[in-house]
């Protein structure tokens, strides 16, 4: 039996981190829901419960928080081969403090909490996968916090562009500035100096 392309894509993603049998892979794929979303479509809004861990097969998404003044603060972004969710809301099944929106037409592979819990019980190897994912996320968050403390805005921008060369084509300047913790005007000045 040939697998559908999205299924093979996510299995390749998993097998970079853990070894799976055919049975484990088939069971995992049976729990996934494919969801197509349009550009500017929300997959999570503040106040709603995050029902899914979402794997990006195609597209680009952004998570953000809107404060009491209506200011949009970019928290994370996710492109192909990445996961995105509000972990606190998903794990606790409580109202989310954040929004997640697609910036491009996107195709997601989603798993709900009940299915994920069943998966852990039936095949504990998946607990190892999610542990590895969580550890990588914690390391990335620690680096981001250290960069925010130790690097200038220009240095943070340079590090972001080096790590994600396509980010400027996929995310608006105001959202990049928000992610970096600088103003769009300052980011514009940094970019001008860089291009000279």
Image (cartoon, rainbow, N blue to C red):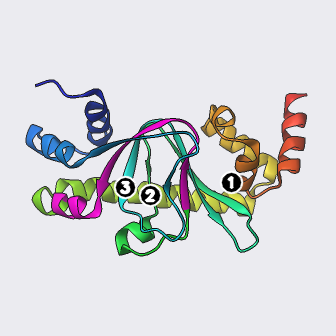
Residue 29 on the magenta segment: no
- Assess whether mark 3 and mark 1 are in contact (beta carbons under 8 angstroms): no
Gap between marks 2 and 3 measured at Cα: 5 Å
User: Which residue is identified by label 2?
Assistant: 85
Query: Residue at point 87% right, 49% down?
Result: 186
Residue in the image at 68% along x and 57% along y: 147
Q: Which residue is at a point 46% across and 63% down the rendered structure image?
A: 86
What residue sits right under mark 3 in the picture? 53
The numbered dot on residue 179 is 1
Nearer the observer, disc 1 or disc 2?
Answer: 2
- Between 69 and 156, the one lying in front of the other is 69
Query: Residue at position x 62%, y 64% from top?
Result: 65
Q: Secondary structure at mark 3?
A: strand
Q: Secondary structure at mark 1?
A: helix
Q: Is residue 130 left or right of residue 88?
A: left
The percent position of residue 195, horizontal first and vertical second, equals: 86, 29
The spot of residue 169 in percent (x, y) is: 67, 31
Apparent side of residue 108 relative to residue 126 in the rendered image (left or right): right
Q: Count neighbours of disc 3 (C-alpha within 10 A) and say few if under 14, some if 14 to 19, many if 20 or more.
A: many
The stretch in magenta equals 99-119
Quadrant of the snapshot with the N terminus: top left
Residue 176, x across and y down, in percent:
71, 47
Q: Earlier in the sequence, mark 1 or mark 3?
A: 3
1 or 2: tag closer to the N-terminus: 2
């Amino acid at each position: 039996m040939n697998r559908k392309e999205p299924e093979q894509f996510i299995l390749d993603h998993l097998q970079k981190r853990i070894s799976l049998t055919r049975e484990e892979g088939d069971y995992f794929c049976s729990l996934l829901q494919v969801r197509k979303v349009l550009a500017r479509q929300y997959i999570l809004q503040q106040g709603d419960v995050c029902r899914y861990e979402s794997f990006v097969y195609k597209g680009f998404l952004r998570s953000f928080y809107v404060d009491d003044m209506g200011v949009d603060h970019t928290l994370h972004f996710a492109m192909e081969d990445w996961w995105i969710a509000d972990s606190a809301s998903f794990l606790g099944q409580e109202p989310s403090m954040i929004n997640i929106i697609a910036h491009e037409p996107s195709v997601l592979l989603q798993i709900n909490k009940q299915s994920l819990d069943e998966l852990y019980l039936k095949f504990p190897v998946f607990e190892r996968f999610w542990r590895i994912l969580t550890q990588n996320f914690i390391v990335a968050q620690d680096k981001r916090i250290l960069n925010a403390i130790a690097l200038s805005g220009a240095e943070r921008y340079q590090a972001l562009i080096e790590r994600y060369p396509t980010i400027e084509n996929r995310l608006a300047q105001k959202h990049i500035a928000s992610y970096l913790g600088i103003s769009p005007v300052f980011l514009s000045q940094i970019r001008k100096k860089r291009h000279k």
